[in-house]
């Protein structure tokens, strides 16, 4: 009898061990499938953090202020051809007309030899590209004196000089157009300074990358910093903001090893305004003190991902991101064999979350008050039912589905804050899209050499991304700032902000170009 109980106990222990090993094998299979999918599989939920690990700047790595002067993505889509589209595409361009006529001695009829007269014309159109040109502009300022005083004055001769624009950098060849071009090529087109140096040489101009680096840093500190500070004041006055952060490496930072990660933080306005502001700030760590210091005085609602640092900000209501939550369930689905995905809990979770986004798309053009009412009536009950459904699901904590459920439960408080105000958004995509230019240029950047260079890059990116968000052409707007800010008082800086009265019309993107850009982004 005793031996029988011993035998049953041994069998039970073996069964428990077999079940444990089977669960472990299943876990490793899921991790293997998910790893393979991340490495080789197509995904519409690509996270941008991995693309941002090679963020950086090479400006300050070659700067010496004491010295004188792509993997391709194919996007395909179908749409109905519009009549007159080519005319729309070219409507913002100047037109140069070239007439082709017969010489007088050839205006003879080939049939009767009579004289020919012009009865009309046919035409074709083509694009003419004029490459960037470099030339030297010499500013000669007239100096005046008085002939009468020269002859008769015993107290000296007054000297009067004509007005002349202030130099961007004293004793330098830097001009508004030159610095704006270098910045736009680097920070918009992702062309590093060594490539620009080669391009200038092909045009017969030797402009070293060290000189260009000096120009970028000096002009950022002298003329863009005041604009940045004014934009920050206006940003913190808003009631709703978005925030995100990403990795950047700085080689020469006091007290830190070169391999240690630093961070570029991003803060931007939400969709409740047509005066968009996008600001970057470099900081050596991911600690709470950095957003706390930057957002000092802000007491509104802040869209973020699930990073716990934001939850500790005083007097700030954090609004979670449903996209980040959905990605966890997307990963869980990818870890399941294809044949088992239909009807799985992961698939059901994605469908439930997807319907919340479907409702948001329907309500996109509603006034905030009406959207708020619709959300409370239709969307909020569905969200609450979704989280209640999660409570009925039983998965091991370490499997992808278990991790997704844990993340959703942990973020429940902040995710549901979207239902506090009709102006709030269901995702933090605005911040992620604003940080994406870093990823686009990742092959042309390796690191930040100094803290000073990282700060300068943050300011330049801020001005450029804010300009783009407000429909301005980065080069033209930068050139305008460098021409205007040196003579503008701090109290008058509002006039040069992207929506200011002083910004000339030629800085603005054509309406058709804006529409085409939005269409491309949506199709992508």
Image: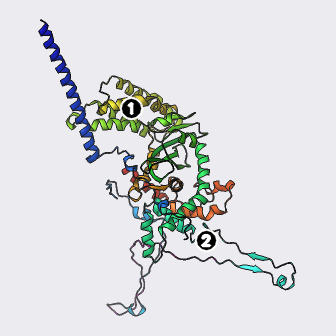
Quadrant, the N terminus: top left
Pick whichever of labels 1 and 2 is earlier in the sequence: 2
Front-lying residue, 107 or 215 = 215
Q: Which residue is mark 2?
A: 171
Q: Which residue is mark 1?
A: 407
The percent position of residue 507, horizontal first and vertical second, equals 54, 62
Tag 2's secondary structure? loop
Q: What main secondary structure does the magenta stretch of the protein show?
A: loop
Front-lying residue, 516 or 265 = 265
The percent position of residue 378, horizontal first and vertical second, equals 43, 29
* Left or right of 81 on screen, residue 308: right
Tag 1's secondary structure? helix
Front-lying residue, 30 or 248 = 248
Front-lying residue, 207 or 115 = 207
Q: Residue at x 33, y 22 (%)?
A: 392
* Left or right of 421 on screen, residue 387: left
In the rendered view, would you say 205 is above or below 8? below
In the rendered view, would you say 442 is above or below 330? below
CA separation, marks 1 and 2? Answer: 58 Å
**Magenta part of the chain:** 111-139
User: Label for residue 21?
Assistant: none
- Is 68 within the magenta? no
The percent position of residue 209, horizontal first and vertical second, equals 47, 67
């Amino acid at each position: 009898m005793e031996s029988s109980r011993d035998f049953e106990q041994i069998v039970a222990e073996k069964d428990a061990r077999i079940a444990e090993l089977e669960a472990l094998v299943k876990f490793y299979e899921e991790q293997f499938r998910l790893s393979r999918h991340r490495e080789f599989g197509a995904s519409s939920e690509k996270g941008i953090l991995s693309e941002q690990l090679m963020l950086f700047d090479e400006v300050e790595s070659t700067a010496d202020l004491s010295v004188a002067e792509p993997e391709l993505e194919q996007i395909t889509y179908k749409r109905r051809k519009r009549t007159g589209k080519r005319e729309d595409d070219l409507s913002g361009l100047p037109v140069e007309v070239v007439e082709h006529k017969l010489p007088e001695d050839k205006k003879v009829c080939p049939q009767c030899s009579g004289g020919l007269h012009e009865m009309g014309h046919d035409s074709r159109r083509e694009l003419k590209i004029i490459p960037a040109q470099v030339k030297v502009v010499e500013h000669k300022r007239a100096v005046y004196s008085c002939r009468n005083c020269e002859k008769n004055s015993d107290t000296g001769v007054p000297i009067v000089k004509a007005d002349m624009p202030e130099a961007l950098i004293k004793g330098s060849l830097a001009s508004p157009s030159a610095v704006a071009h270098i910045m736009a090529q680097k920070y918009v087109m992702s062309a590093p300074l060594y490539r620009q140096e080669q391009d200038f040489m092909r045009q017969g101009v030797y402009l070293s990358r060290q000189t260009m680096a000096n120009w970028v840093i000096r002009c950022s500190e002298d003329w863009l910093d005041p604009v940045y500070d004014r934009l920050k004041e206006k940003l913190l006055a808003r009631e709703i903001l978005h925030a995100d952060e990403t990795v950047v490496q700085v080689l020469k930072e006091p007290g830190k090893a070169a391999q240690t990660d630093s961070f570029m933080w991003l803060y931007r306005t939400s969709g409740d305004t047509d005066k968009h502001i996008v600001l970057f700030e470099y900081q050596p760590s991911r600690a709470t003190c950095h957003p706390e210091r930057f957002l000092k005085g802000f007491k509104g609602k802040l869209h973020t991902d699930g990073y716990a640092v934001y939850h500790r900000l005083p007097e700030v209501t954090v609004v979670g991101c449903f996209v980040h939550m959905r990605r966890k369930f997307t990963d869980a689905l990818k870890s399941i064999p294809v044949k088992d995905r239909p009807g799985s809990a992961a698939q059901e979770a994605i469908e439930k979350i997807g319907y919340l986004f479907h409702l948001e798309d329907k309500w996109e053009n509603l006034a905030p008050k009406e959207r708020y009412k619709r959300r409370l009536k239709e969307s909020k009950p569905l969200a609450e039912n979704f989280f209640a459904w999660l409570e009925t699901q039983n998965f091991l904590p370490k499997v992808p589905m278990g991790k997704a459920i844990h993340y959703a439960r942990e973020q429940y408080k902040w995710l549901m804050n979207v239902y506090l105000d009709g102006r709030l958004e269901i995702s933090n995509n605005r911040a992620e899209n604003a940080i994406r230019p870093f990823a686009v240029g990742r092959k042309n950047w390796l690191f930040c050499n100094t803290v000073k260079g990282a700060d300068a890059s943050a300011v330049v990116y801020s001005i450029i991304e804010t300009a783009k968000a407000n429909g301005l052409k980065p080069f033209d707007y930068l050139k305008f700032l460098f021409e205007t800010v040196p003579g503008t008082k701090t109290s008058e800086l509002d006039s040069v902000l992207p929506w200011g009265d002083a910004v000339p019309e030629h800085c603005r993107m054509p309406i058709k170009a804006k529409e085409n850009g939005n269409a491309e982004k949506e199709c992508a």
